[in-house]
Image: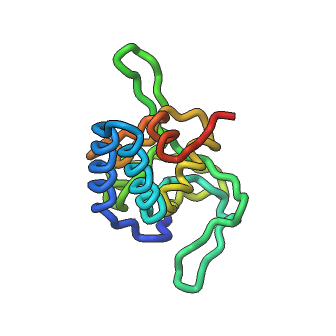
Amino acid sequence: NNYKSGLDVTNPEAIKYIYSLYDEYMEAQGEEEKDKFQSLMEDVVERSCLALMTIVNKSDLVTLPDGTYELKKDASMIIPSLSAEDDEGNELSYFPLFTSNEQIDKWGIKDNVELKEGQVLISECRPFDQHIATFFGAGEYDALLINAFDQAFVIGKEFIKAISGHQEE
């Protein structure tokens, strides 16, 4: 079994809260409301823990006393992504995140991923802001996709830029 789970990711309320904030943002009129929304989103960003599936070298994992693990700083990782065509036939790349181990299981990746010797598939629970940094730094993604095989909540790149203050280099 190549799948390991460090932290149990169980925060179903986070996805509901993000949905409500996204709706608020889309309905917001004027800069004052958008600023209020941004401060609310910053709160979510600091408090949310979502899981990202990654392939890492087993040698880059440090086992902690409680039996969980920690990925060494600057360890290389492969992020399995999802892709689909939009209505115009353009290929879109999604950065998949999950709110629970149950949601990860719906992907079926544990049974279908091909690992090289020494590699392991892990679920890494991190704060939302760290996922945003990875989203912009790890590849050319079009959107975040939370709970892809159930709720399929898509957060587009422009919205991510708006809530994170990320500037193109």
Q: Is residue 110 visible?
A: no
Tell which of 38 and 7 is nearer to you.
Answer: 38
Q: How many marks?
A: 0
Q: Position of residue 145 (x, y in %)?
A: 40, 42
Query: Image point 35% across, 43% down: which residue?
Result: 148
Residue lying at the far right of the rendered structure: 74
Residue 118 higher or lower than 6, as above or below:
above
**Nearest the eye: 155 or 58:** 155
Farthest residue, direction bottom = 65
x and y percentages locating residue 122 in the rendered image? 52, 60
Could you tell me residue 142's position as x and y percent?
49, 32
Q: Which one is in front, 122 or 132?
A: 132
Q: Does residue 135 appear anywhere in the picture?
A: yes
Q: Is residue 25 left or right of residue 7?
A: left
Q: Residue at x 41, y 40 (%)?
A: 31
For image coordinates 43% across by 47% down, the residue present is 35
Provide residue 19's location: percent of width, then percent of height: 29, 48
- Residue 105 vertical placement versus 152 (above, below): below
